[in-house]
């Protein structure tokens, strides 16, 4: 139905009143017409007035219904907006939780990866530099050598002998081998096992005369000879040391020892 404004309703009502006035005027002049014609005219006017009144009522009712419908529509729209706001807030909360969960997952992954890298590093060969030589060693090999050296430095020479001897048995081709021989000989010297000490020092010299510890090993052989009362042998060893390694600190010590033997 076409929407009618309040002003239009008022105009229709005014027209109805006007028509009613005409009806009254017509009834006062009814004598001018035939009775049948007068009654017919009056009935027709009454019907028209009644129709106008009904139309006016319908228009007013339709306007009220339309306004009520618009009100309900606005209420529904407001309700939908509130629901939408609630959904947005819920999604925002879910997004924040997902962001936090993702950050936690990334941190756990980073920690796990670092832990794995550390564990793998313990299993992989490592580069070490000992006595001027660089070489690769396994984790267990490195650990055993360092453990034996730590015991030696504590002064427990009997235990150190056992640890170095065991190390050389397990890792005969290790980059640590010659240095281990040197410390084994020193541990034996400290426990007065001079013959075994000389054997290990001479093994080191024979395998690598250019080794960082070779001059000290030669000096240690001469010291063992002195302890065994082999002065002649010690003098020769000191002399050989001075000739082979003239610039070494061991050669300086050998010269001093030779001077005391004369």
Image (cartoon, rainbow, N blue to C red):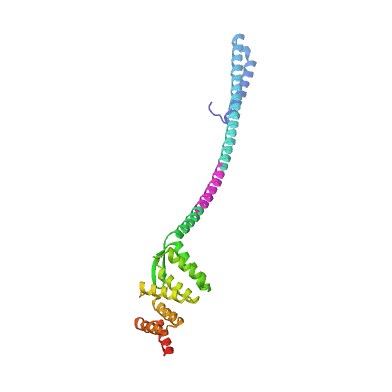
**Residue 160 or residue 13, whichever sits in front:** 160
Residue 125 falls in image quadrant: bottom left
Q: Is residue 33 magenta?
A: no
Taking the view exactly as shown, the residue that stands out farthest to the left is 243
Labels in figure, total: 0
Q: Position of residue 63 (x, y in %)?
A: 59, 29
Give the quadrant of residue 235: bottom left
Residue in view at x 46 percent, y 62 percent: 140
Please, is residue 219 above or below residue 95 in the view?
below
Q: Nearer the viewer, residue 171 or 91?
A: 171
Q: Is residue 41 left or right of residue 180?
A: right
Q: Residue furthest bottom?
A: 262
* Magenta segment main secondary structure: helix
Measuring from the top left, give residue 109's x and y in whole percent. 49, 53
Q: Residue furthest front?
A: 229
Residue 213 image position (x, y, % from top left): 40, 75
Q: Is residue 30 above or below residue 231?
A: above
Residue 256 in view: yes
What is the quadrant of residue 23 in the picture?
A: top right
Residue at image coords 48%, 70%: 161
Is 200 in front, or is 120? 200
Image location (x, y in percent) of residue 212: 39, 75
Depth check: give the residue in front, 193 or 4.
193
Q: Residue at x 49, y 54 (%)?
A: 112
Quadrant where the C terminus is found in the figure: bottom left
Point out the stretch of residues depicted in magenta: 87-106
244 left or right of 14? left
Would you say residue 18 is visible in this rendering? no
């Amino acid at each position: 139905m076409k929407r009618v404004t309040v002003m239009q309703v008022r105009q229709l009502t005014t027209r109805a009143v006007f028509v009613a006035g005409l009806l009254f005027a017509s009834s006062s002049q009814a004598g001018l017409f035939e009775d049948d014609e007068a009654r017919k005219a009056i009935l027709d006017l009454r019907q028209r007035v009644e129709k106008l009144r009904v139309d006016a009522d319908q228009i007013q009712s339709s306007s009220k219904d339309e306004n009520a419908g618009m009100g309900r529509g606005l209420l529904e729209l407001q309700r939908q907006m509130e629901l939408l706001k609630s959904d947005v807030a819920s999604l925002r909360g879910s997004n924040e939780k997902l962001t936090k969960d993702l950050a936690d997952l990334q941190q756990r992954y980073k920690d796990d990866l670092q832990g794995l890298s550390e564990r793998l590093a313990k299993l992989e060969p490592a580069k070490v530099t000992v006595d001027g030589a660089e070489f690769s060693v396994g984790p267990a090999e490195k650990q055993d050598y360092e453990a034996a050296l730590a015991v030696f430095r504590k002064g427990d020479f009997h235990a150190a002998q056992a640890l170095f001897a065991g190390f050389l048995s397990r890792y005969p081709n290790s980059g640590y081998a010659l240095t281990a021989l040197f410390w084994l000989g020193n541990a034996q010297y400290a426990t007065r096992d001079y013959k075994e000490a000389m054997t290990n020092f001479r093994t080191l010299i024979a395998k690598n005369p250019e080794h960082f510890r070779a001059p000290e090993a030669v000096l240690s052989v001469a010291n063992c000879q002195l302890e065994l009362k082999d002065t002649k042998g010690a003098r020769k060893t000191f002399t050989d040391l001075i000739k082979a390694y003239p610039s070494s600190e061991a050669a300086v010590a050998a010269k001093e020892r030779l001077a005391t033997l004369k």
